[in-house]
Each structure stands twice: as structure tokens, then as C-alpha cells.
Image: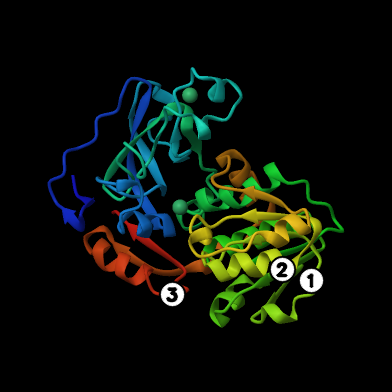
Amino acid sequence: MKALVFDRELYLDPHYPDPEPLPGWAMIRVDMAGICRTDLELTRGYMGFKGVPGHEFVGTVTDCDEAPWIGRRVVCEINNACGKCDWCARGLGRHCPHRSVLGILNHDGCMAEYCTAPVVNLLPVPDDIPNEKAVFIEPLSAAYEILEQVEVGRNDRCVVLGDGKLGILCAWVLTTVSDSVILVGHHATNLAVAAWDGLETTGDVQTVPQGADIVVEATGSPQGLQDAIALCRPRGTLVLKSTLAAGGALNLAPVVVNELTLIGSRCGLFARGLQGMVAHAFPVERMIAARFPLDQAVQAFAEATRPGALKILLEMA
Ligand SMILES: [Zn+2]
Ligand SMILES: [Zn+2]
């Protein structure tokens, strides 16, 4: 099959071996995939990754032991858990120490004509959700993870720092539970894309009143983390969404002085993301900046590295 491969460099392999589904797994024809920040990091050495990248996709099951799945349009959870350990028993397969992760850890991803996934990870996509929306279920689930971790009340003041794709999704999700959500970013186009009922946007962090109950850091920059700490009220909650945020020198004294609760937040449950998409009609497709055929995937990655770039999609067929 045709596949995008990373092995010290990124290249298109027209004759990559077809994946072989394990027992209890499904073979899926990929229809559309999204490039996310994590993919860009993988191509810079993150996780020591080698193989086919990609974990955000929508596809169609072509082969599976459980016949009813064949022909169904699906999205799928990206963590392949062992199902036997204590973490799995607690419903936290996303933290299973034995897991592989689609396109990230020991499992070829979706930037290819085909990929495989455990049947337990599959979710059927309702007919009225087009591929252009379904491809956002993975990042939307990551945004919903905040609500799994933090109790957010109607009157809680929420601030999201960072107007990248994940920041925008987090802000939209927070508007479903809080009447006060501000998104702060540096890209006028992204802030325009983010416009949504109940969401205030600003390009200037100085204009945001301090004392927020919940601050979500999604800038990916050390400065963003400092700003987040400064905006949070004493005993407030800081949700860390960027894996790179703590790269620089960091003054944690205000965290101690103000007794902040720091919460690291990563992927979420797809079922929750899908439910949210059905219930709230978030205009995710506005975030699509460009679409490329799989043949031009290397160019697509170059495009996706532009600062502030919104979603770049790969179309397989
Ligand atoms: Zn992602
Ligand atoms: Zn496990």
C-alpha cells in the first residue's frame, strides 16, 4: 500500500507492506486523516518514532472477524490497551503501561491507505457526520478530557491560552459548561475561526482580568505557562494541555504561594467527543486550512509547520 513513513526523514513509500490485523482487530481503509502537532513533534524525534505516523482519522472497515463492522465508517480510540492490568481494570487503558498507540508508539498510524485497530476501540460514525467533522473527534475528545478531570461550574471563569486547534476546541467545550470563557491568542484569523456563542476572544493577554477559576494552557510555549500561572486565582486550577510548555526555565513559586492545582491533560474518551460533536454542532470544519492527497503528504507536513497553521487534512482516495 501507499504510506507516509518516518524513518529519520519523512517520505512517501508507494510499496509499504499492508498491515495485518491481529486476532480481534479490524482492517480499516483510511478515508481522511488530520495532521496534528504531535505528528510534527514525532518527525523532530519525539518518542524516537519510526514508521507510519497519524492518529486522527476516519475510515471504513474492510475486514474484521466481527462481520457487522465490515463496511462501517468508523473512528477509533488511539491507545491499544492490554485489557489485563490494573489500569485497564479501572477503565484507564489510556495509561496502560503495556499499550501501543496508533501512529505514536509501536503501532503504525493512519497516514496510509490502510491501518488496523482493535475492534474494542472502534466507534461507528453517525451518517449525518461527514468525514470533515469526524476527523476532529480525536482532538475534540482530548478537549473533553478537561471535563473528565475538572468540575467546571456555570459561574466559573475560564480562560484558554492559545488559539491553535486544541485551544479553540477546549474553549468551545468549556462554553458548554461555563458562562464565562475567554480564548486568548495571537492569530487574528484563528480567533475569527473560533467565534462561537458564549465565547469571548482577545489578542491581548493583558486585557484578561486576573483571578480566573480555571486556566487552560494550550500555547505550547513557556511564556504561555507563566501567563497561565499569573491569571489563575488562589486555589484555582491550571490545566496543562501542551506537552512542550515546561521546556524553558520556570518559576513555580506562584504555584505554591497561590496553592494552584496543576492538572496534566492528554487524550480523552472518543465516546465523549463524539457525543459532544452530536450535541453541540461545533463548527470544526472551519478549522480546515487545506487538504492534500496522500501523494503530497510531505508537502502537507511542511504546510502544517507554519506558525498558527490550522488543520491540514490528508485525503486517501
Ligand atoms: Zn493529535
Ligand atoms: Zn493494561
Picture colour scheme: rainbow
Q: Residues within 10 Å of mark 3 (few under 14, many from 20)?
A: few
* Residue 232 point in image, percent of width and height: 75, 63
Quote the CA–CA distance across marks 1 and 2: 7 Å
Residue under pointer 3: 307
Question: Residue 238 falls in which quadrant of the image?
Answer: bottom right
Is 201 or 98 nearer to us in this picture? 98
Q: Secondary structure at mark 1?
A: loop
* Residue 78 point in image, percent of width and height: 44, 39
Left or right side of 137 for 28: left
Quote the CA–CA distance across marks 3 and 2: 25 Å
Quote the CA–CA distance across marks 3 and 1: 27 Å
Residue under pointer 2: 230
Q: Secondary structure at mark 2?
A: helix
- Which of the two discs, 1 and 2, labels the residue nearer the N terminus? 1
Residue type for callout 2: Ala
For the residues carrying marks 1 and 2, which lies nearer the camera in this image? 2
Q: Residue at x 16, y 39 (%)?
A: 17
Is 7 or 177 nearer to us in this picture? 7
Left or right side of 46 for 282: right
Residue under pointer 1: 210
Tags 1 and 2 in contact by the CB under 8 Å rule?
yes
The image quadrant where one finds the C terminus is bottom left
